[in-house]
Amino acid sequence: MRPNEMLSFVNYIKRRISESISPGCYISRRVLNAKQLVNWSKCQNVGDVCPADELHVTVVYSKVDVRYHKDFILDHNTLTIDPQAYYGRLQYLGDKGAVVLKFQDAYLFNRWRTFSSIGATWDYPTYIPHVTISYYNSEVRWNVFVVAPPTFPLLLGPEIAEDLV
């Protein structure tokens, strides 16, 4: 085996071991004005609104723990999402009935891409930043498409890294 092949093999083995024993890595940003978003949601007659302390934006949901990579750095700054970035109406997302506010943000997308470049995994085709506001009851599916997005910005806290559970 050549030296380069041996190094590649060693790195492959290290990654496989890390994947098998690591809990993975979850990075998010809390919504700092979550109470405002909850109050707005209730005024829009959104049902089963998530508690304010649970509102967040996921940046990384990885089965591979990248927190020990030499290029791993969390962003400790806050971030403001302008209402112009919202995708329009509230939308359903996934098969668990999540009602979300999607938005575009190049900085968050680039953060996700940076973590991906150091080995973070992602189970979806691409990254779309969003806040889950509610989970609808499958028996009572209301029309989220008539709810216009909020007119105030989202204020996001610094990145927080945790074990994936």
Image: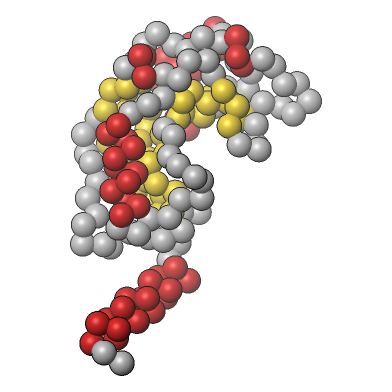
* 143 left or right, relative to 29: right
Residue at position x 34%, y 44% from top? 112
As drawn, 9 above or below 33: below
x, y (%) of residue 87? Answer: 45, 20
Quadrant of res 108: top left
* 90 left or right, relative to 56: right
Residue at position x 38%, y 71% from top? 15
Label total for image: 0
x, y (%) of residue 3? Answer: 23, 87
Work out whether residue 129 or residue 29 is closer to the camera in this orientation and state it.
129
Work out whether residue 105 or residue 49 is closer to the camera in this orientation and state it.
105
Residue at position x 53%, y 26% from top? 100
Seen from this angle, which residue lies furthest bottom? 1
Residue at position x 30%, y 54% from top? 117
> In which quadrant is the N terminus drawn?
bottom left
Can residue 163 be seen in this snapshot? Answer: no
Seen from this angle, which residue lies furthest front? 2
x, y (%) of residue 137? Answer: 71, 27
Quadrant of res 48: top right
